[in-house]
């Protein structure tokens, strides 16, 4: 039997804290909690958790700053919790190195799904990455830069290929517009959101059965895209 | 000659050029003096005087007449290269030439000055006309200030013009001094003082309208310009005009903010009355049910489960209501900044359906998006909220298991996103009422809701210069049309 995953929760509201703790303990995770950023940082150093749940509105410190500091020495997944109508903060947190986000009010099932996804993803990063990415009946060969759809070669332009590869290499993870722009177009392009949306549209036409109800390239409104295998 | 060249015109240039012209002209003609009659040569000088009068005005013209007479006497009247005039006839020629030259020069210069004045007036009135047109279109004080600064830089050659509102009068910095401002306000006229830079003056111009001083405008310009009467007149005319426009914009802003305040006041009242009813009731039952659960040791397990599930649904409906109230308050406060981005409309429809998965449940959602729709410019977060509200509305007011159809198609200048249901439809003639705040199709309906969702959706549509309206659907049910304007998208560079 594996030891239960250790999750560090930094949240100042006691009710939300209790809710998250009970929900996660029901799913047999072990939790450490902290009400302030300072306490949280201390616990993170001491206990070496496998996942960090971080509320963005902490009383003693700016959440973004915390993430930047934390990323300086740890690479464990960070799941940020934000209030609604804070899309720009969420984007900033993701750009600063957070891995995913939950918006209050969130459901328990959503919380558990996100936690599970982050913990599942974590060890994969240490494995040898394979040059093949598979999803649906598609196969991306990162060496030959070819995409096969059910064995048939799918024609993609340079940019479409790079975009698909960037998305599919991070399944389940939300990628901000900026992160994708930088990966696909390089550093200078990060202001041209329109380009990204147009190419995502093209890509959906080519790989989604119903582009209006995408199965693989999901839109996170105001934030970015999430790829689903 | 225009206003601009008058400003930069150098007075001495005329005299110097005239002198050079007289000398070189005399030397040029001197070889032909045997061929030309003396009186014809005199006429050539008169012609020169006319030309100088046209070009440089009275002073140089008179100077030309005098210099020309001397040159004539010196070069052409025998004995040559001497000022002596031996023949009475020749003396008369020279004298008449001088008199004619002076009169013609004077008249030409007069005419020239007159033409210049007319041209200048035309220039001024066209400049005034331009600035008036420009200013008339401005709504806010900020825009008026911008347009005025632009005018002073482009047309009045002002360097670093800047507005100073009355509340900034006591925090001036050099070269502006309190004394200068109070002098300017006292005289209600333009005040100037020499600038640090040679040839430049520092100017402050009061903007006075009927309700008092609106602001002062400070700038630097060439000293020559401020010495020109017409420049000062134009500056002051524009200033008084700007003052009136500023005053008007100021009042308009005040009216707008008052209107906003009273709307906010109304909203607060409606929210309060809604809160007391729509939130207090479910909260009462929520607390009650929690009490029952805490006390009831011998409550049957299925009874407990049913209490818990109804607590959950009550809490969810309060949550929905509160988030709608917050959305509404935010939209109505006018503080929402639209994050307008070009994007395909199907993207936001897809995201909405994903968000709405728990309310559409296992209903059949029929999605029809027309091919080749142009990208639109909108705030994805808000449009998603508007569409979500429409989908939620459709689910709430139509029987379970009936189909919901979402279509997107081009309708003239708009893309029409329609959410249709197979519910009871709308009472005829009341298609508009349902969009009012806290308005519901049937006020006594047992379906939870406070009548906010559609009002929010409409506010969002209007904020995007779009429309939201509803009509009854053929074959039963209602359709809600969200119209978003098609604009010309930025030129999209194809991939190399």
Image (cartoon, coloured by chain):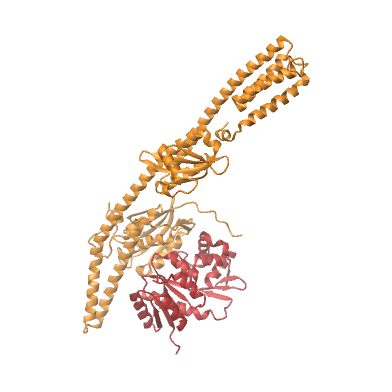
Chain colours: A red, B orange
Residue that extends furthest to the front in the rendered view of this protein: B179
Question: On the rendered structure, is A186 left or right of A102?
Answer: right
Question: On the rendered structure, is B258 left or right of A221?
Answer: left
Instruction: Determine if residue A216 is in view.
Output: no
Where is B53 relative to B181, above or below? above
**Image location of residue B21, percent across then percent down:** 69, 26
Question: On the rendered structure, is B34 left or right of A193?
Answer: right
**Image location of residue B12, percent across then percent down:** 63, 31
Where is B234 relative to B150, above or below? above
* Quadrant of the image occupied by residue B300: bottom left
Query: Is A157 in front, or is B403?
Result: A157
Locate the N terminus of chain B and report the quarter of the image it occupies.
top right
**Image location of residue B118, percent across then percent down:** 52, 27
**Image location of residue B93, percent across then percent down:** 69, 13
* Quadrant of the image occupied by residue A165: bottom right
Query: Is B337 in front, or is A196?
Result: B337
**What residue sits 68% from the left and 21% below the top?**
B68
Instruction: Determine if residue B322 is in view.
Output: yes
Query: Is B171 in front, or is A91?
Result: B171
Residue that extends furthest to the top in the rendered view of this protein: B88
Q: How many marks?
A: 0
Query: Is B441 in front, or is A74?
Result: A74
**What residue sits 44% from the left and 68% below the top?**
A90
Locate the C terminus of chain B and report the quarter of the image it occupies.
bottom right
Residue that extends furthest to the bottom in the rendered view of this protein: A1
**What residue sits 46% from the left and 38% below the top?**
B190
């Amino acid at each position: 039997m594996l030891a239960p995953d250790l999750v560090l929760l930094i949240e100042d509201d006691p009710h939300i804290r209790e809710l998250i703790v009970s929900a996660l303990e029901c799913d047999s995770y072990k939790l450490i909690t902290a009400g302030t950023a300072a306490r949280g940082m201390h616990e993170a150093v001491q206990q070496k958790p496998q996942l960090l749940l971080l509320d963005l509105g902490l009383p003693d410190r700016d959440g973004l700053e915390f993430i930047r500091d934390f990323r300086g020495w740890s690479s464990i997944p960070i799941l940020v919790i934000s209030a609604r109508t804070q899309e720009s903060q969420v984007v900033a947190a993701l750009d600063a190195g957070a891995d995913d986000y939950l918006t209050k009010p969130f459901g328990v099932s959503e919380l558990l799904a996100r936690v599970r996804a982050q913990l599942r993803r974590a060890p994969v990063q240490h494995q040898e990455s394979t040059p093949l990415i598979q999803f649906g009946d598609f196969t991306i060969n990162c060496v030959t830069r070819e995409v096969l759809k059910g064995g048939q070669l799918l024609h993609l332009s340079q940019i479409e290929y790079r975009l698909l590869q960037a998305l599919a290499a991070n399944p389940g993870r939300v990628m901000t517009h900026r992160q994708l722009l930088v990966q696909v177009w390089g550093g200078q392009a990060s202001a041209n959101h329109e380009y990204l949306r147009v190419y995502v549209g093209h890509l959906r036409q080519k790989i989604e059965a119903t582009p209006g109800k995408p199965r693989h390239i999901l839109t996170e409104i105001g934030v970015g895209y999430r790829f689903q295998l | 000659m225009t206003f601009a060249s008058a400003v930069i015109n150098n007075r001495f240039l005329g005299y110097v050029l005239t002198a050079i012209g007289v000398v070189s002209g005399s030397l040029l003609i001197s070889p032909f003096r045997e061929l030309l009659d003396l009186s014809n040569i005199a006429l050539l000088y008169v012609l020169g005087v006319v030309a100088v009068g046209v070009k440089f005005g009275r002073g140089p013209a008179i100077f030309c007449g005098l210099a020309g007479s001397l040159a004539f006497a010196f070069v052409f009247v025998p004995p040559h290269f001497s000022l002596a005039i031996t023949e009475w006839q020749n003396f008369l020629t020279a004298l008449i030439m001088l008199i004619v030259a002076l009169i013609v020069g004077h008249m030409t210069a007069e005419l020239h000055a007159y033409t210049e004045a007319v041209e200048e007036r035309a220039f001024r009135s066209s400049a005034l006309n331009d600035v008036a047109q420009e200013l008339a279109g401005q709504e806010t004080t900020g825009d008026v200030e911008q347009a005025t600064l632009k005018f002073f830089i482009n047309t009045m050659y002002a360097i670093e013009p800047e507005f100073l509102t009355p509340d900034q009068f006591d925090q001036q910095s050099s070269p502006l001094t309190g004394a200068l401002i109070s002098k300017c306000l006292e005289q209600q006229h333009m005040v100037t003082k020499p600038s640090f830079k040679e040839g430049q003056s520092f100017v402050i111009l009061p903007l006075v309208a009927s309700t008092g001083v609106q602001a002062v405008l400070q700038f630097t310009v060439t000293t020559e310009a401020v010495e020109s009467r017409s420049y000062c007149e134009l500056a002051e005319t524009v200033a008084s005009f700007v003052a009136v426009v500023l005053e008007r914009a100021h009042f308009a802003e005040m009216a707008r903010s008052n209107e906003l305040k009273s709307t906010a006041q109304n909203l607060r009242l409606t929210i309060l009355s809604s809160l007391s009813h729509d939130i207090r009731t479910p909260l009462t039952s929520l607390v009650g049910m929690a009490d029952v659960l805490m006390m009831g040791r011998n409550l049957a397990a299925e009874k407990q489960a049913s209490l818990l599930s109804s607590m959950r649904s009550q809490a969810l409906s309060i949550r929905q209501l509160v988030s709608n109230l917050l959305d509404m308050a935010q939209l109505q406060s006018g503080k929402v900044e639209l994050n307008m981005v070009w994007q395909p409309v199907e993207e936001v429809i897809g995201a909405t359906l994903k968000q709405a998965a728990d309310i559409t449940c296992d209903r059949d959602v029929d999605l029809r998006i027309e091919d080749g729709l142009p990208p639109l410019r909108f705030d994805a977060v808000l449009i998603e909220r508007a569409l979500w509200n429409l989908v939620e509305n459709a689910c709430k007011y139509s029987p379970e298991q009936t189909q919901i159809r979402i279509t997107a198609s081009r309708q003239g200048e708009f893309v029409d996103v329609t959410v249709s249901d197979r519910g009871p439809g709308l009472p005829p003639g009341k298609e508009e009422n349902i969009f009012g705040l806290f308005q519901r199709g049937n006020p006594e309906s047992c379906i939870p809701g406070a009548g906010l969702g559609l009002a929010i959706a409409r506010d969002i549509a209007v904020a995007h210069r779009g429309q939201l309206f509803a009509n009854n659907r053929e074959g039963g049910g209602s359709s809600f049309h969200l119209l978003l304007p098609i604009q010309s998208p930025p030129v999209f560079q194809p991939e190399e």
